[in-house]
Image: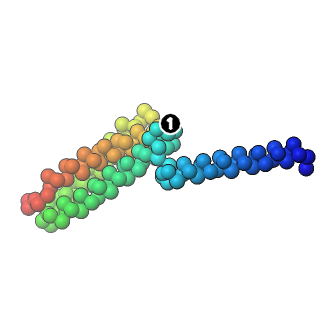
């Protein structure tokens, strides 16, 4: 191999190694790929992560509240919760309709889900300890 080609080949190898190292460093920073100031895909991932966190909090609170209720009130809360879930999803689909098919749609949809879920989590406290 000629010296000029050899140097170019090593340069290409070094560039690829550098790019792979930067990509790995970015992946190590946030394994989910979330970057609120990043590209659309990274912002979408942040919105999905935030919704998952809100949903986990809701499920914990729901279980805590259910443990304080009489059996009759558990049935009532379960019925209300199921209706709320259907309504939340339908409302967020409507709220994100304008961006449907676009790259921003997951961000808009998941942000709506997160906001609604956090609101519902706070509302569950009104059920605590109900007897009837």
When the figure is inspected, residue 64 is found, relative to residue 19, above or below; the finding is below
When the figure is inspected, residue 10 is found, relative to residue 38, above or below; the finding is below
> Residue 75 appears at what percent x and percent y?
19, 62
Tell me which residue sits at (66%, 48%) in the image.
18
- Kindly state the secondary structure of the residue where label 1 is placed: loop
When the figure is inspected, residue 21 is found, relative to residue 132, above or below; the finding is above
Using the rendered image of the protein, determine whether residue 75 is visible from the camera's viewpoint: no
Neighbor class of circle 1 (other Cα within 10 Å; few <14, some 14-19, many 20+) is few
Q: Residue furthest right?
A: 2
Res 108 → quadrant: top left
Tell me which residue sits at (75%, 49%) in the image.
13
> Residue 17 appears at what percent x and percent y?
68, 50
Nearest the eye: 52 or 77? 52
Q: Quadrant of the C terminus?
A: bottom left
When the figure is inspected, residue 56 is found, relative to residue 120, above or below; the finding is below
Nearest the eye: 79 or 92? 92
> Residue 22 appears at what percent x and percent y?
60, 47
| Residue carrying label 1 | 102
Horizontal relation, residue 38 to residue 19: left or right: left
Q: Residue furthest top?
A: 98
Tell me which residue sits at (12%, 65%) in the image.
70
Using the rendered image of the protein, determine whether residue 22 is visible from the camera's viewpoint: yes
Nearest the eye: 20 or 59? 20
> Residue 129 appears at what percent x and percent y?
11, 60
Horizontal relation, residue 57 to residue 10: left or right: left
């Amino acid at each position: 191999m000629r010296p000029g080609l050899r140097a170019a080949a090593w340069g290409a190898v070094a560039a690829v190694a550098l790019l792979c190292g930067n990509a790995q460093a970015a992946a190590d920073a946030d394994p989910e790929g979330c970057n609120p100031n990043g590209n659309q895909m990274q912002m979408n991932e942040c919105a999905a992560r935030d919704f998952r966190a809100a949903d986990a909090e809701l499920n914990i609170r729901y279980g805590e509240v259910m443990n304080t209720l009489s059996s009759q009130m558990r049935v009532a809360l379960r019925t209300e919760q199921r209706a709320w879930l259907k309504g939340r999803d339908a409302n967020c689909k409507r709220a994100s309709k304008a961006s449907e098919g676009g790259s921003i749609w997951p961000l808009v949809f998941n942000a709506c889900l997160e906001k609604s879920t956090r609101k519902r989590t706070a509302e569950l406290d009104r059920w605590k300890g109900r007897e009837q």
